[in-house]
Image: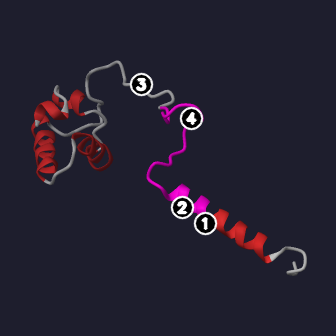
Amino acid sequence: FGSSHFGSSSLARAAEDIQALGHLLRSPSFKMGRMYGNGKGMASSALPYRRKPPTWVKMKTDDVCDHICKLAKKGLAPSQIGVTLRDSFGIPQVRSVTGNKILRIL
């Protein structure tokens, strides 16, 4: 494409538009989700009906409580503690293992 086909002003304008769009996408308030509404949705997410821990969870209640206290002393929020226990230790629901929620244990 030669400069005769596209004027330099239109190229500069297009570059500014692309830069502004990139800034919008990097802003912390931008999130993908619903077009009309602010939720991102949790499709088909429901807790299991059984209140017993799964058979493959081998940690004892005291061990889970100790891990929760250690993570809380590091400054993690209860939701972050739950994510860490789920991802690192394979505990799907703290309440099913301990009988109490993370915030009650703290």
The residue positioned farthest toward the top in the image shown: 49
Element type where label 1 sits in the image: helix
**Among the 4 quarters of the image, the one containing residue 11:** bottom right
Estimate the spatial distance between the alpha carbons at disc 4 and disc 2, rounded to whole Å.
21 Å
Q: Which residue is mark 1?
A: 19
Q: Which numbered mark, 4 or 2, is in the foreground of this view?
A: 2
Residue 19 is situated, as x and y percent measured from the top left of the image, at 61, 66
N-term-proximal mark, 2 vs 3: 2
The residue positioned farthest toward the right in the image shown: 5
In front of the other: 5 or 9: 9
N-term-proximal mark, 1 vs 4: 1
Tag of residue 46: 3
Tag of residue 34: 4
Q: How would you rate the neighbour count of disc 4 (Cα within 10 Å): few for under 14, some for 14-19, many for 20 or more?
A: few
* Amino acid at the residue labelled 4: Arg
In front of the other: 63 or 72: 72
In front of the other: 104 or 37: 37
Quadrant location of the N terminus?
bottom right
Estimate the spatial distance between the alpha carbons at disc 4 and disc 3, rounded to whole Å.
20 Å
Element type where label 2 sits in the image: helix
Pointers 2 and 1 in contact (CB under 8 A)? yes
Residue 65 is situated, as x and y percent measured from the top left of the image, at 12, 39
Residue 24 drawn in magenta = yes
N-term-proximal mark, 4 vs 2: 2
* Amino acid at the residue labelled 2: His
* Amino acid at the residue labelled 1: Gln
Residue 92 is situated, as x and y percent measured from the top left of the image, at 31, 36
